[in-house]
């Protein structure tokens, strides 16, 4: 799926003062930088490389405490991420703030929710599986990084900078207004409807050493992805009607030829 938003000519009724537009631009830029740092940290958090705190490191506590804390921080992210993505919330937000910063605010709060998860995550070190064969372990690790590349590549297919709010604030700074969103299906979106979600699933499950904590993270986030797909597609049908219904009938959700 791809929704693109194009800019139109200047509209005097909607052009703010230069100072306001500059502040909006700085806000959107800061939100994007925080997002990008959070995304890079996510790669290390899940894969266990480079970053100081990963899904398997940190101070340990009892299994019940770790389970409770981890479920709470994942739930905070899920509620924020899904709640603010709904059309009803977007309409409510734009009643009180500029539409130009709606996406940046969503991205910023999602990033802060993830930072909270990284900070408060409790490791659950019980081993579920461990691949001893170096070649196979390396292959699985490479699969995880491939998943992250699929995620990033797919965002650029559907306008990366618009997806994370930069296009909107730059357009606002230039004194232009957005034209209605259009639907298109470039690249991987011709094969599956949700390549970003597929990339996340691959990245979360492709690990040579699976602990109970990592398993919890992968299982809960995968379940949340399917909930997110349901909610997102409901909104897309509402926005694009039969055009999206036909696309959904022809193109698999996550695995070409299967579902």
Image (cartoon, rainbow, N blue to C red):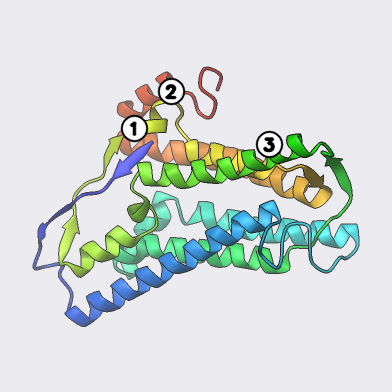
Please say if 231 is above or below 22.
above
Vertical placement of 256 versus 137: above or below? above
Cα separation between marks 2 and 1 = 10 Å
Considering every residue shown, the one lying at the far bottom of the view is 19
The percent position of residue 167, horizontal first and vertical second, equals: 29, 58
Rendered residue at 21%/49% (across/down): 6
Give whichever of 13, 178 is nearer the camera: 178
Q: Select label 2 or label 3 by which is in front.
A: 3
Return the mark for residue 162.
none
Tell whether 95 sits left or right of 192: left
User: What x and y, as percent, mark residue 168?
Assistant: 28, 60
Q: Nearer the viewer, residue 46 or 79?
A: 46
Q: In the image, is residue 121 above or below residue 5? A: below
Q: Which mark is residue 251?
A: 2
Please identify the quadrant where the C terminus is shown. top right
**Residue 86, position in %: x, y?**
44, 50
Marks 1 and 2: in contact by CB < 8 Å?
yes
Residue 147: image location, x then y, percent: 57, 41
Give the distance between the C-alpha atoms of the residues marked 3 and 1, in whole angstroms.
30 Å
Q: Quadrant of residue 129?
A: top right
Residue at 15% across / 67% down in the picture? 175
Mark 1 surroundings: few (<14), some (14-19) or many (≥20) residues within 10 A: some
Observer-nearest of 216 and 243: 216
Mark 2 Cα within 10 Å, few/some/many (few <14, many 20+)? many
Per the image, the residue denoted by label 3 is 139
Residue drawn at x 61%, y 67% as measured from the top left = 115
Precedes in sequence: disc 2 or disc 1: 1
**CA separation, marks 2 and 3?**
29 Å
Q: Nearer the viewer, mark 3 or mark 1?
A: 3
Which residue is under mark 1?
A: 185
């Amino acid at each position: 799926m791809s929704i693109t938003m194009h800019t139109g000519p200047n509209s005097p009724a909607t052009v703010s003062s230069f100072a306001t537009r500059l502040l909006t631009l700085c806000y959107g830029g800061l939100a994007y930088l925080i997002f990008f740092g959070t995304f890079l940290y996510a790669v290390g958090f899940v894969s266990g490389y480079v970053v100081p705190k990963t899904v398997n490191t940190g101070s340990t506590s009892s299994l019940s405490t770790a389970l409770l804390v981890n479920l709470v921080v994942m739930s905070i992210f899920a509620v924020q991420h899904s709640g603010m993505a709904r059309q009803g919330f977007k309409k409510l937000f734009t009643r009180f703030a500029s539409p130009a910063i709606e996406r940046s605010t969503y991205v910023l709060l999602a990033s802060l929710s993830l930072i909270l998860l990284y900070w408060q995550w409790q490791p659950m070190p019980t081993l579920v599986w461990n691949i001893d064969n170096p070649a196979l372990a390396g292959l699985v690790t490479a699969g995880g990084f491939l998943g992250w590349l699929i995620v990033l590549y797919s965002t650029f297919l559907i306008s990366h900078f618009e997806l994370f709010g930069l296009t909107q604030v730059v357009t606002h700074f230039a004194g232009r207004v957005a034209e209605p969103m259009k639907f298109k299906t470039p690249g991987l979106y011709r094969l599956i409807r949700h390549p970003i979600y597929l990339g996340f699933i691959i990245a979360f499950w492709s690990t040579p050493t699976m602990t109970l904590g990592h398993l919890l993270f992968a299982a809960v986030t995968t379940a949340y992805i399917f909930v997110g797909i349901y909610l997102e597609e409901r909104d897309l049908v509402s926005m694009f009607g039969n055009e999206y219904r036909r696309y959904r009938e022809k193109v698999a959700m996550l695995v070409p030829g299967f579902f």
